Image (cartoon, rainbow, N blue to C red):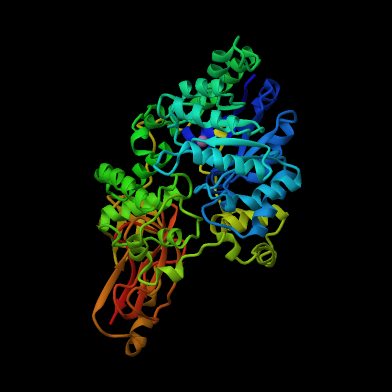
Amino acid sequence: MVQLHDQTLRDAHQSVLATRLRTEDMVPICDKMDKVGFHSLEVWGGATFDACIRYLNEDPWERLNTLSEHLPNTPLQMLERAMNIVAYRNFPDDVVKKFIKLAYKNGCDNFRIFDALNDLRNMKVPIETAKKVGGHVQGSLCYTISPVHTVERYVEDFKELEKMGCDSLCIKDMAGMISPTRAYDIIKGCKDAGIKIPIDLHSHNTSGMTGMAYMKACEAGVDILDTSISSLTGATGQPPTESVTAALKGTEYDTGYDMELLMDIREYFNEVWDKYRHLHRSQALRLDPSVTMHQIPGGMLSNLVSQLEKQGAADKYDEVLKEVVKVRKEFGYPTLVTPTSQVVGTQSVMNVKFGRYKRITNPTKEYFRGMYGRPPGEISEEMYEMILGPDWEDEVIYERPASLLEPEYKKKKDELEDMGLLRKPEDVLTYTIYPDIGLKFLKGEVEAEFTSDQLPLEKPGEEKEVVPRIEYPYEGKVRVDGKDYRVKMRNEEKVIIDGKEYNVSVLFPDGQGPSKSKDKSKSKDAEPSGEETQINAPMLGTIIDLKVNTGDKVNAGDPIAILEAMKMENDIPAPKDGTIKTLHVQKGQDVKEGDQIATLVG
Ligand code: CO
């Protein structure tokens, strides 16, 4: 008998509905899903935590709690990114331990733990903690194709995970590119090597051959297969629960699930699918066998497309795709999964935009320092020198990266308490893991981009009043939807464009408002002189930190601001020595490519 691990409430909507499914659209079907007898249901972790607080104004901890109440009979699983937990950087041990404890307390039974680099050292603390609190631990290895990712290596690492105390194992094929033969060879290899604990295969439909891979996995002795209800599978989701159940019926692998019950569930999710129609994307529904050639997961591809569109470089898509393949090789063949997919993806975009390694992102430097873990394959000395400079050998670390991190939980707890925002211990983790958006959420400042009862939204093209975006309305100029207009501004709340009146809130960037012009003339003597250089945003993103104040002296290369773009942090460096005359942005401000960040003189 083979059992299914249903992914509908986590990976399915992460894959085809931009992770936006709301708890209130999950609860009504829980009763039926709980009756199927699934091995487990994945309902939490991965990108759902971020999406809850960023887009839905939902407390992820409450979601877990609610689902656990409504699904009393089925083990619930979370996807845990080892030391990255549910975010994109390494956290210290105390934070990881606390998170797992509270996840278990709130109803998470099973922990699927993986590391983007398959660095087992990064998986040790979460595995031990989840075991200690009483959870079931599924040790996972990311599947990819490369000269260093051999069947033998997978079998060896799985053996090691069994030794580390895991209760089951998982081949995590997040890109949906595993071939029937590879699935068979790895699973058979594990069984032949004497691995006793159950093996789960997680895959996506992307390549079009996943159904065949599932059948071969059965023949090799797989114990669990990951599926999702057909309504939310598309091409980037999982093979359909109903189809796999039907395919195995009457064979020795029969799941024994009630097909009629599954059809009821399908009917429910068909309605959900229609309701979220504003998120339907044809790319998510189209199979893409090219994944077997370039090894780039569908999620990363669609991310790259939307990032390139936003950066006004959609025509560079093919070039970036080729660059990703090159960069991945130069990085020692990391699997392209969060967060390494973002590191490789962002660096590839930079390489195409500015020339190869002309601009090196902070995460790329961190990766080469070993701060994500040990790269799976060799990296040349030339690459190390190019990224980290001639003294690269002093910069690279060889220990487990998180062992270099200071404990954070207590400090964050105190901070939250001082702000009067500590309502429950879980809040400390929300704040620690997502300091900016998490804090905004805890302050109650996040607005849900939609609520379930507002859905379905209008279809694109349907009549809807468009409110123009008005930016920087100062010096008599406003920019509306990217076009500049000269306007007369009677006061600071209203502007008239083409005879129509708009309300605006006028936010003058520091030192730029007309009201401050008097102060400016007063302090003219103190103003630094010399040639002015504008420092502009290299790409679209959010200014998450400013490293300088007006009047600060800087040297060429010093960071002026940190720009978060494509989920990665990038320094914006000073192009030359000088003094900061003006800062045009504030922390938290969104910027487009070419927007002024600062004026430098000297
Ligand atoms: Co997946």
Above or below 371: residue 81: above
Front one among 339 and 29? 339
Front one among 297 and 528? 297
In the picture as drawn, the residue positioned furthest to the bottom comes out as 525
Q: Position of residue 453 (x, y in %)?
A: 57, 33
In the picture as drawn, the residue positioned furthest to the front comes out as 193
Q: How many marks?
A: 0
> Quarter of the image containing the C terminus?
bottom left
Q: Where is residue 558 in the image (x, y as percent from the top left)?
A: 38, 74
Could one spot residue 507 in this view of the protein? no
Q: Quadrant of residue 461?
A: top left
Above or below 350: residue 214: above
Above or below 170: residue 357: below
Front one among 360 and 307? 360
Above or below 27: residue 107: below
Q: Where is residue 269 in the image (x, y as percent from the top left)?
A: 56, 24
Task: Write the residue at 29% across / 80% down.
Answer: 601
Task: Write the residue at 55% across / 41% down.
Answer: 156
